[in-house]
Amino acid sequence: MSKIELPHGLAKRAPHREYRTKTMSYRRIVARLKANLRRLRTEQGLTMEKAALLCDMDYPQYHRIETGKENITLATLARLVDGFRVEADDLFVAPKLKEIAPKK
């Protein structure tokens, strides 16, 4: 197996959190999660407060997740899955363009 060359400095220390959250993959995952949470919540006729209760979390935490301001754990992901009664992959399907388009 060949050795992988890392960019200068990465071999000595882990990437900074700022770097990890600025990658295209990270932003794509967050955009999908945000759009799907909003879609599921509105389809079920829920406010953010009611969605938070169903997902066994407080409103500020749910709000940060749906707005993409919180990096969630697998335990939190499981609470979202259980609260909305969906499979985990349902939270990461590619949303339709109108679901992620900015409001005018």
Image (cartoon, rainbow, N blue to C red):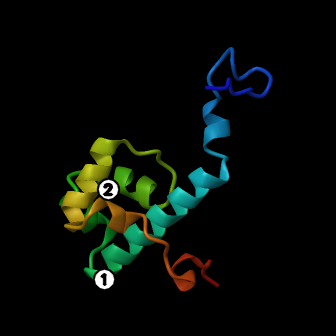
Q: Quadrant of residue 93?
A: bottom left
Q: In which quarter of the image is residue 7?
A: top right
Q: Residue furthest right?
A: 8
Q: Where is residue 75 in the image (x, y as percent from the top left)?
A: 28, 43
| Residue 72, placed above or below residue 1 | below
Task: Look at the image and tell me in which quarter the C terminus lies.
Answer: bottom right
Residue at figure coordinates x 69%, y 27% from the top left: 4
Amino acid marked by disc 2: Tyr
Nearer to me, 60 or 39: 39
Amino acid marked by disc 1: Glu
First along the sequence among labels 1 and 2: 1
Crowding near pointer 2: few (<14 within 10 Å), some, many (20+)? some
Residue at figure coordinates x 51%, y 56% from the top left: 68
Dot 1: what SS?
A: helix
Residue at figure coordinates x 68%, y 14% from the top left: 12
Q: Residue 43 carries which label?
A: 1
Quickly name the residue at label 2: 59
Judge from the rendering whether residue 92 lies leftward or rightward of residue 51; answer left or right. right
| Residue 102, placed above or below residue 27 | below
Labels 1 and 2 touching (C-beta < 8 A): no
Q: Position of residue 100 (x, y in %)?
A: 56, 76
